[in-house]
Image (tube, rainbow, N blue to C red):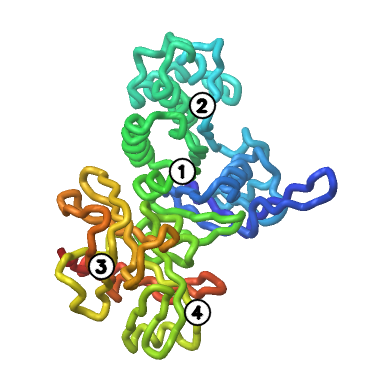
Amino acid sequence: MAELTLDNVSKVFVEDDGNHIVAVDDVSVDIRDGEFLVLVGPSGCGKSTTLRMIAGLETITDGEIRLGGEVMNDKEPKERDIAMVFQSYALYPHMTVRENMAFGLEESTSMGDDEIDERVSSAAEMMGIEELLGRKPRELSGGQQQRVALGRAIVRDPAVFLMDEPLSNLDAKLRSKMRTELQRIQEDLGVTTVYVTHDQTEAMTMSDRIAVLDDGRLQQAGTPLECYHEPANEFVAGFIGDPSMNFFDVEVQGNQLRAADFTYPVSDETLQEIGDRTTLELGIRPEDVTLSTDGATGEHDFETVVDVVEPMGDENNVYLTFDTGGEPDEDDETFVVTVGGMQQVEAGQPVTAHIPEEAVHLFDAKSGESVKNRSLEQVETLGKRV
C-alpha cells in the first residue's frame, strides 16, 4: 500500500539576518493509494517545496509525512521508495538512454544486469523509446528527453511518483499529447502520484484531486469539478478556470446586491445564506452568462456594450461593460463572457447579458470564504439561453 499523508506539515526558511520565511504553512492532505493528486498554485506558493519535503530533499520544520503509515521525516531520499521527475529532466549527458534509465537501479539495488536490462526494456517499450536506447541526451528532442526521464522513474517501480512541472519545457501541442500519455501510464501502473504545476489546465485534466496552494497554505483539496463549481474561497474561484471568474464588489441592501454599475435582486433563499453580512464579492463564470439582442426582459438581465472580442475558434471571449447611460470611458470596468464561436458579436454592439442567480457565487468580502456556490447537482440542469 502507498497511502501518502501530509500531517500539519510546515517549512520555515531562516535567512542570514534571522528573518523567518514561511514557505509551507500547516498543510494537511491524505493522498490515497494509486491516486493522482496535483498540487497547483501561483509561483512561490510552496508547491515545489512541499514536493521536495516529500522526496526528502528538504527537511521538515514541523509536522509529519507518512508513507504507508510509516513516518518519513528522518529517512534519506534513497530510503523513501519514491521516484522523482524534475522540470529539467536531469539526464546524464555522457550516458546513453539505456545507461540513464539503468543508473538508479545499479546504484541503489542489488539487481543483476539481466533483471535491470529487462526492466529498462519494458519501460522503454511503455514510453515508446525502444529505438532511442543507444542515443545520448543531446541527440534527443525535448519530448524524447521527457520520456526518458519518465522511463527512468518507472523502472524504479516506486511506491510514489513525484513530478515537478515535467511538461513545462515542451511546446503546447506536445504538452497536450504528453498530458494524455501521463494519465494513461499512471492509470496502467496504479502508482500514487503527486504532480506539481502552475498550469490549471494540467490540474483540471490530469488529476483525480487538486490541492490548491496559496502563500504556503492549502486553500482547498477536492476533485477538479468540486474546485471549479464549489470553490472554498475567492482565491480558488479566481485561480481555477480560464478565463477567470468575474468578481464584483457588492453591498447588501434589502433583497438586492448593489454594485457600482448594476443592482442584482436575490431570492429569500440566497438572503438566508448571506445572513447578516453586508459586503460581499459576487462571482460568475464567463460561460454562465448568456448574451442576446432581445433587450432586458428579466430581473437578472443587464444592458451592456461589447468592448473587445477574442475569437478562439470554437468559442469567443467577449469583454463587456455595463451600459449605465453615460458616455463610454476607458476606465469602465469590464467583465468577460464566453459564447459559442458561431455567435456573432462585434465591438461597440449593445447586448443584453443574463446572469442567472442559480449560477452566481458569493464570497465574504473580508475573509474571502465562500458564502454561496452553485451545487454540482445544479450543473447538469443549468440551461443556456441563446
In the picture provided, is 75 more to the left or to the right than 261? right
User: Which quadrant of the figure has residue 257?
Assistant: bottom left
Q: Which mark is residue 353?
A: 3
Q: Which residue is mark 4?
A: 279
Dot 1 alpha-carbon crowd within 10 angstroms: few under 14, some 14 to 19, many 20 or more:
many
Q: Residue at x 56, y 10 (%)?
A: 94
Instruction: Residue at 35% x, 12% y: name it.
Output: 131
Q: Amino acid at mark 3?
A: Ala
| Mark 2 crowdedness (10 Å alpha carbons): few <14, some 14-19, many ≥20 | many
The label shown at residue 89 is 2
Please say if the residues under marks 2 and 3 sit with CB atoms less than 8 Å apart: no
Quarter the C terminus occupies: bottom left
Identify which amino acid the numbered label 4 is placed on.
Thr
Q: Which residue is mark 1?
A: 193
- Image coordinates of residue 98 in percent, x first then y, are 46, 15
Identified by mark 2, the residue type is Tyr
Q: CA distance from mark 1 to mark 4?
A: 41 Å
Q: Earlier in the sequence, mark 1 or mark 4?
A: 1
At mark 2, the secondary structure is loop
**Disc 4 and disc 2 in contact, CB within 8 angstroms:** no
N-term-proximal mark, 4 vs 3: 4
**Sooner in the amino-acid sequence: mark 2 or mark 3:** 2
Helix, strand or loop under label 3:
strand
Question: From where the camera sits, is residue 305 visible?
Answer: yes
For label 1, the SS is strand
Foreground: disc 4 or disc 3: 3
Quick check: 349 above or below 353? Answer: above
The answer for how far apart the CA atoms under marks 2 and 1 are is 17 Å
Q: Which of the two labelled residues, at mark 4 and mark 2, occupies the earlier sequence position? A: 2
What is the x, y in percent for residue 65? Answer: 61, 51
Image height of 254 relative to 294, above or below: below
